[in-house]
Every structure is written in structure tokens, then in C-alpha cells.
Image (tube, coloured by chain):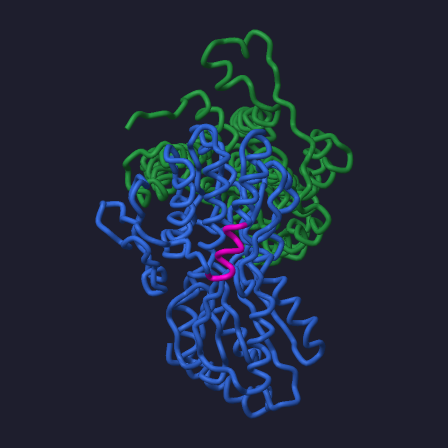
Amino acid sequence: MELSINPILLVASLMVASTPILLAAIGEMVVEKAGVLNLGVEGMMIVGAICGFAIAVETGSPAVGFVAAALGGAILSMLFGFLTQYLLSNQVATGLALTLFGLGLSSLMGQGYVGIKPPSTPKLDIPILGDIPVLGPMIFSHDLMVYISLAIVAGVWAFLKYTRGGLILRAVGESHDAAHALGYNVILVRLAAIGFGGACAGLGGAYLSLVRVPQWTEGMTAGAGWIALAIVVFASWRAGRVLLGAYLFGGITVLQLNLQAAGVAIPVELLSMSPYLITILVLVIISSDRNRAALNAPASLGRSFHASS
Amino acid sequence: MKKRTFLLTGVAAAALASGAFADGHAPVKVGFIYVGPIGDGGWTYEHNKGRLAVEEHFGDKVETVFQENVPEGADAERAMTQMALQGADLIFTTSFGYMDPTIAVAAKFPDVKFEHATGYKRADNVSTYSARFYEGRAIQGHIAGNMTKTNKIGYIASFPIPEVIRGINSAYLHAKKVNPDVEFSIVWAYTWFDPAKEADAAKALIENGADVILQHTDSTAPQAAAADAGNVVTFGQASDMGEYAPFPRVSSIIDDWAPYYIQRVQAVMDGTWESVDTWDGIGPGMVGIGEITDAVPADVKAEAEAMRDAIGAGEYHPFTGPINKQDGSVWLAAGETASDGDLAGMSFYIEGLTGEIPN
């Protein structure tokens, strides 16, 4: 059977399909680098999805919607931050609760928005670059959020690697006691990281409801937040690998659906599990040097900090 | 394990002793287990409408509880157990994948009645019920075959279970009848509800040339993807999905569970509940055909409505021979209609469909 898949369309939809997970994962990576494990990604994503959707519908502007989504995610994450950083609640339990809370809250907020069409997010028409034959429609003809998500990845990478702020954040994540002894405000740094993670998750959610699907449906993240969490771990807390993981996962998801639609004679069971299988395999192989991977895991991950202890 | 069993029996005994189970005065407690959120706009939305109808019909004589987003598998058992422990008298488990968990939990709670949707395993306290969705699929197939210009119809399937396969066969059979050149591309999404994945599947099908999309997943995401593409026809699945009418959604299959739910709750109140197997279609009203919009040519619409009425009146069976299986062997001879047993366990494509059914 002839392959009727158009590679240009495929790469284009790959980038769209990967962006929500990428945004959520890169945010969570920063949170974990600061030594906090926030399992509430799914909850923050879905709250971002409805905040962004609702505001975009009310104002008619997707851009305002995305800002609202980031704010919504960040505000929800501050609830987590307050509980875990000031009240020293257990991070795993609080994160799970945040997911449940976010799912409930979002369906409450979304009551009036079922079946509504959001304002469409314009695709950028980049001069010159967009006119390159093949590459133009493939890579340079997306909406702004796709590029913002890539810029965030690059920014996070540079921030963690080259800046003093990044060093402080990593120090807090490695040994909060040492960072505290050096005079850094551990709680403040962590709150900032949690807020950033929440904002990114919110953006990812809004990308789902405003661009990728685009509509509001209860529970529409359907586990994307958990995939993002898994990608952070398998990417051994490195920005570049998070990007690779998210694009692999999104890409293979789209590819396998396309292969099925084109009627390629590969067993569907194999195709269907391929996104999970290949993403995990590739990331595990890249991170197979166990000593180095272990070094990458923030040493204080998931531990509560109190100045007296 | 032992400790847990002990605890369970302990709690159950306590519940019995305190008279939480139906004693004729306390309201009958009815539980619902949903696979998606009640706002999915499709399958779960309709089951929840049935629940609300029960509440409205019986007023304070019933109390209903429900749990959404219950994964199919081990977690479902936990949700059902919890509901039974909370004193539910009747529990509706509304997805195919709850079949074994329902049977397992029902064995532990012989006094609680269970009703499992779309399955085939029954017990003394487990009934099954389903709708003949394939009747609606026949009408969709007829419209789809007439409306496709590319002769390519995309089908977003969920899991390879008989119910889904029946739908594919029925739609294909009737599309092929009116359009011999029609081809089906089938994508197995392996989910009932994941709007992003459903949207991706719809886009993949559209990019591969399909201009009609049939879906057997629960959300309205494929409708949104089709609306975005502009010239793609869709059908509402499980619910009317009227937000997308008159185009891309040109008609729909609507599941109406309310009469059945009311009847079964009444049976529990009267003490006449028995384990039964119910499979109703267009005739009794369990399957409804949503309004066929004007985007469909008038003659096609009239034919579709005639088919609907003929099926409803029992004059026409969507699976009437001659029909061959995919491998060319004879399934139904000319004039022969499919038996319910054959349909219930259907695990083969009919002749003309390409690809294989995953196991």
C-alpha cells in the first residue's frame, strides 16, 4: 500500500501535538530542580485550560486568554506552595489533592462554556522564513505559542546553566540546608519555582483548549499532566531532553494515528503503545549512565524544609 | 488480603445491622459509575441525563450517587465496592470495561443489584443492558456514503470490542450499498475519552483524504476538528452534539437511557428486580436519531428517515444477507438476518473492509 502521509503536515501537527506536554514538563522540571515535587500538574493544566478558554471567549483575544491561563495555573500552584512551604504538608499528598481539586474546580468554572467555539489563534506569517519551500510550512507557520514554548525551554536551559539565579535554584534543590546556611531564602526561591511551574502548566492546558482541540470539555487534559511528569524523570531533569521527550511523545502519537489512517499494515496494538514505549526507551538509553543520571536528580527532591531543622 | 476481606465483611455487616439497606422506608440508593466526566457531551453525559431523570421521576424516594472518570480495570472495583459499602441498592456500571470488575464486586455483595452496560456477563444480581447502536450506524452509513466526495470515510474507533465492530460493519455495509467506491479508514484510539487524541485522530484522517468522520469515542473533539477543516461531515455520537449542527454534524445517534433506568429503579422498589439481558434499539426508543440537517440532500434525508422508520417498526434488519465476511466466506445467506448471538460476539469485519481488527 502506498504511503499517503504528507511529511510536511506530519511535522506541523507533531509540533502542535507536543506543545502542551512540553510546556507542562518544562515548568515541572524547574519546580523539581528547586527540590519540590508537585504532582498537581494535571490539575494546574486543566485549570489553565478553562481559565484561558473562558477569558479568550469573553475578551475575544486568545493572547489575553493565554495570559489568564498562566495566571490561573500560577495562582493554583500558590495554594500548593502555601500548603507545602509554610504549613509543611506532604508534597505527594498535596500534589495529588491539587490535581483532584483542579479537575473539580475546572468543571465548575467550565459549566457555561461547553460547546462554544473559541476565537481562533492566528498563525504567524513569518516573512522570508515562512516562504522556504518544505521547511516553511513545516516549522515556520505555527501560532506564536509554539515558539514561545521553545523559547521557554531555551530560556530555562540558559537560566539553569549560566546564571547566578539558576545556580541558587539548583543549590536549593540539592541541599536546602546548605542554601539556607549561605543566606538564601529557600522558601521564596521554591515559591517562585512553583509559580513558574504553575504558569507553564496553565499555558500548556490553554494550548489544548484554544489551539489543539479547540474547545472546552470537562477533563480534557485526560492524563497529559502525568505524561509531563514522567517525561521530566525520564529526561533526567535536563531541558534539552525534556524537549526531545515531549516531541518524541507527541510526534509518535501523531505518527501512529497517521499510519493507521493511511492503512499501513502494522499491528495497531504496537502502534498504539509506541509513543510510551519509544519515548521511555530513548530517554532511558540517553540517560543510561546511572551515576550521572543520579547526579542530575535534585538531592532534596520532595523533602520539606523548615529553617529550624 | 485477609485483613481487607475481614474489614469489608465487618463494614457490610454493620451496614446491614443498622438497616441501611432497603427496608421499604429509606430512599432507594442508586449508584452510577462513569468512564468519563459528566460534561463530555457524549456517552457519559447521556447516562447522567438518565440519572437526573431517575431523580426527577422518583423525587425523594430515591437518592443517587455517581463517580466520574473511573478507569476501566482494577480501580473500577474499588469505586464500586465503595459505592456498595455506602449502601447503594442498585449500581449501574456504564462502560464495557467494567464487566469483570462488576461481576467480581457483585459476588461480594449479593444483596446489591448491579446493571452493567454493553457487556455480556450476568449473575443472579447482575443484569446487562445495551442499545442497538448498529441500527443508528446503518443510517449514518447511508448518509455518509451519499455525502462523501473523496469516497474516503474516516472512522475513529475506541476499543476492538463487538459493540464497536458492529458499528463499523453496519456503517460500512450501508455506505457501500449507496456508493460502491467507498473506502473506510479506521483509526483505533484505544480510549473512550481523550479530546486531544480524538482531535489528532480526526485530523490525521482528514489529512489522509477523509471527508466524512464517524466516531465511536465520547467527546466532541472530532466535531471541532471537522468544523476547523471546513468541509468535513460528522455525526453526533451517543449524544446529539447539536452545538455542531447544521454542519459539520448532520445527524446523530442519541442514547436514551432514562426510561430503562426508571423502570429498573421501580423494579428494585417493587422487589421485582431480576437479572435480565436488555438490548433495545430504535423501536423502543433506546436509540434515537438526531435531526438530519438540511446540509444533507433532501432525497438522502428522506431515504434515511424511511430506513429509520423501517428499522423502528422491525421491518428491516440492518444485517440482512447476503453478507460475506472479510475473508470472503458466507456469513448470511440472501434474506437471512443476523441472530443476536452472532451480533453480541461479533469479532470479524465484513467483506470489503481493509485492515485487521486488533486483538
Please tell me which residue lies in front, A120 or A283.
A120
User: What span is colored magenta in the figure?
Assistant: B306-314
As drawn, A266 above or below A154: below
Left or right of residue B209, residue A31 in this image: right
Please tell me which residue lies in front, B101 or B125.
B125
Is residue B311 rendered magenta in the image? yes
Left or right of residue B79, residue A86 in this image: right
As drawn, A219 above or below A117: below
Is residue A218 rendered magenta in the image? no
Image quadrant assignment for residue B120: bottom left
Image quadrant assignment for residue B77: bottom left
Q: Residue at x 44, y 37 (%)?
A: B154
Q: Residue at x 72, y 37 (%)?
A: A68
Q: Residue at x 42, y 51 (%)?
A: B167
Left or right of residue B78, residue B356 in this image: left
Image coords of residue B170 (percent x, y): 40, 49
Q: Main secondary structure of the magenta part?
A: helix
Chain identifier, blue in the render: B
Outermost residue on the right side: it is A59
Image coords of residue A201 (percent x, y): 60, 40
* Quadrant the N terminus of chain B occupies: bottom left
Left or right of residue B275, residue B267 in this image: right
Please tell me which residue lies in front, B183 or B359.
B183
Q: How many marks?
A: 0
Asked whether the viewer can see residue A285, the reply is yes
Image coords of residue A287 (percent x, y): 35, 36
Asked whether the viewer can see residue A238, the reply is no
As drawn, B152 above or below B347: above
As drawn, A215 above or below A163: below
Q: Residue at x 56, y 52 (%)?
A: B289
Image coords of residue B72 (percent x, y): 44, 60
Chain identifier, green in the render: A
